[in-house]
Every structure is written in structure tokens, then in C-alpha cells.
Image (cartoon, coloured by chain):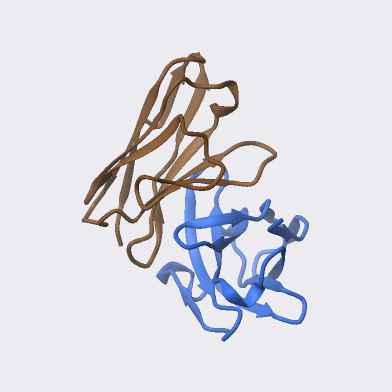
Chain colours: A blue, B brown
Amino acid sequence: EVQLQQSGPEVGRPGSSVKISCKASGYTFTDYVMNWVKQSPGQGLEWIGWIDPEYGSTDYAEKFKKKATLTADTSSNTAYIQLSSLTSEDTATYFCAKTGPEGFDYWGQGVMVTVSS
Amino acid sequence: DVQMTQSPSYLAASPGESVSISCKASKSINTYLAWYQEKPGKTNKLLIYSGSTLQSGTPSRFSGSGSGTDFTLTIRSLEPEDFAVYYCQQHNEYPLTFGSGTKLEIK
């Protein structure tokens, strides 16, 4: 059974960074691109970017290029997103989502990030 | 970026009824459209991809149609578990973009 288990809620101070994890199981981690998606409170979904765990290659939506850094550890089948220079605009839930043949066929449960002083 | 306009944003219906949700792309995306279901306490679920192909496990009462810029998700004979939020997403080009969502509530 494919599962994407994300880490727990995070609170970050303005200007700081947070790093969220997404541990994959039930499939070959390096065979599929992992995506990250943002959902601001009461809002819809925004695609942040993807990482190819096998090669470490990444692609980002323009607005997240200076905000998010995607990495992956193939030894632990875990993908990460680091969010830097936090502002109130970064308060949101962040999801990892595995790319299937088409679309995102499995999602993590989401991690709430709260930016607060 | 491809803008995805989803409507309605809110829909109230009764179990047994049929409903349709529209998703319009700002440019042609061929048939590269997916539909997702969001429910509290559950992970998001891929329902349909490539406009009309049901993901494994999606009940047959769900159907998708359209190509180019206009797409529709139809749910026939609503079941209680279908009341949720639905999103469309284009996967024709990067950046991938989503519709703003449709909340389907019980009337």
C-alpha cells in the first residue's frame, strides 16, 4: 500500500526557516517524481514544484523559486521541503503528492505551518 | 500560466441527485485534466485523469468529459460519501495549476 507520511505541524518565527518531511512507502521511491502543494487557509491549491528523487533534479513554480527548496534522501525514501524567510503569507498547509502516470495519485496528509512571533 | 476557472464554487444537492462541476482552462490543455476529491480527515484522492479516465477505485457514478478548454465532472446518484470539495488540475504544462474548488454540500 502506497503511503506518504508527513511530519508534524510546525511553528516558525518570521524570517526563520522550517523543513517538512514526507516519507514514502509501498513503492519504489526513485521511480516517481514527488510534488509539493500549498493550501493557504480557506483557499485552494497551489503547486510549488517537483523533485525527481533519483537524480535530485527539481522544478519550481516561479513564485516559489526563492521560497522553497526541495530535496530527497533515497536512503530513507524521504522527500523534504524547506521554506525560508518565513512571512505570514507562508502560513498554510503543505502537501506532498506522488506523480502517477498522470495526475497526483497519492497525497500526504498535509502539514500545517504557522508563522508567528 | 494556465488559469483554471472552476464553477460553481458551492453546490448543494440531495443524495440520489446528479450534479455537474465545470472547469475552464485559459488555453487549450488537450485532455490533460485531473479531478480530485478533498474530505476532512482523509488524504486527497485522484478521481479522474486525462479528462475522462477513472482512477482505479473511483466509483462508476463519477464521470469526466471535455477537451481543449472546457471540462465537466459529473456525479450521478450522489451517495453520502460524495459530499466533499472537488478540484480540477491541468497537467498539460508547468506550472501545474488548480481550479479554486467546488464545495458540494448536502441540501
Q: Position of residue A102 (x, y in %)?
A: 44, 60
Q: Nearer the viewer, residue B63 or A51?
A: B63
Q: Nearer the viewer, residue A1 or B8?
A: A1
Q: Nearer the viewer, residue B104 or A98?
A: A98
Above or below — where is B46 with respect to A69?
Answer: above
Residue depicted at 43% across the width and 16% down the height: B17
Q: Position of residue A117 (x, y in %)?
A: 72, 58
Residue depicted at 59% across the width and 46% down the height: B44
Is B99 left, or right, of B82 in this rendering?
A: left
**Residue farthest bottom in this picture:** A55
Above or below — where is B33 with respect to B10?
Answer: below
Residue depicted at 30% across the width and 62% down the height: B1
Whether residue A67 is visible, yes or no, is no
Q: How many marks?
A: 0
Quadrant position of residue B19: top left
Is A101 left, or right, of B23 in this rendering?
A: right
Q: Nearer the viewer, residue B102 or B66?
A: B66
Q: Position of residue B66 (x, y in %)?
A: 26, 43
Q: Position of residue A66 (x, y in %)?
A: 50, 76
Whether residue B94 is visible, yes or no, is yes
Residue depicted at 55% across the width and 31% down the height: B84
Is B88 left, or right, of A68 in this rendering?
A: left
